[in-house]
Amino acid sequence: MEKLTEAQIEKHLENVDGWDYYDDAIHTTFEFDNFMDCFSVMTRIALEAEKMEHHPDWHNTYATLEITLSTHDVNGLTEKDFKLAAAIEHIVGDE
């Protein structure tokens, strides 16, 4: 998988609301009503990430989930990151 150019990244960002690009990665934060809602979404994301063989860096505190996506093999972003971001958006949107 090839590292995306800055122009490609900017184009992809148009399709994933609420994600910010910095430090060669995309980042977002989700707030839920409680820990169980947050953990439920994390579980669904984990199952999807495993299917895609691409795993997020994330941090959870109570009802807050912070997610960072990048492709470590290329030290930057690839199509995989934006596919997983779109899947995450879909999962969170179902809640």
Image: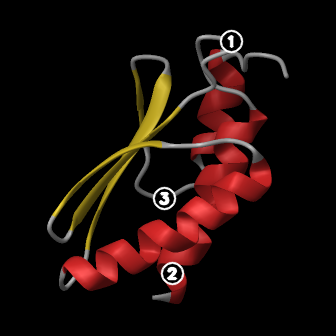
**Disc 2 or 1, which lies upstream in sequence?**
1
Mark 2 is on which residue type? Gly
Within-10-Å neighbours for mark 3: few <14, some 14–19, many 20+: few
Q: Residue furthest right?
A: 1
Give how far across and how far down residue 21 sits, in percent.
Answer: 44, 31
Mark 1 is on which residue type? Val
Residue appearing at x 77%, y 57% in the figure: 51
- Which circle, 2 or 3, is nearer the viewer? 2
Asked if residue 31 lies left or right of residue 46, the reply is left
Residue appearing at x 72%, y 20% in the figure: 4
Of 68 and 60, the residue lying toward us:
60
Asked if residue 18 lies left or right of residue 93, the reply is left
Disc 2 is placed on an element classified as helix
Q: Which mark is residue 93?
A: 2
Give how far across and how far down residue 56 sits, in percent.
Answer: 51, 43
Q: Quadrant of the N terminus?
A: top right
Cα distance between the residues tagged 1 and 3: 24 Å
Q: Quadrant of residue 82?
A: top right
Asked if residue 20 lies left or right of residue 77, the reply is left
Q: Quadrant of the C terminus?
A: bottom left
* Residue 15 seen in render: no
> Contact, CB < 8 Å: mark 2 with mark 3?
no
Within-10-Å neighbours for mark 2: few <14, some 14–19, many 20+: few
Residue appearing at x 60%, y 32% in the figure: 10
Give how far across and how far down residue 19 sits, in percent.
Answer: 43, 47
**Disc 1 or 3, which lies upstream in sequence?**
3
Disc 3 is placed on an element classified as loop
- Which circle, 1 or 3, is nearer the viewer? 1
Residue appearing at x 39%, y 17% in the figure: 23
Q: Which mark is residue 17?
A: 3
Q: Which residue is mark 1?
A: 74
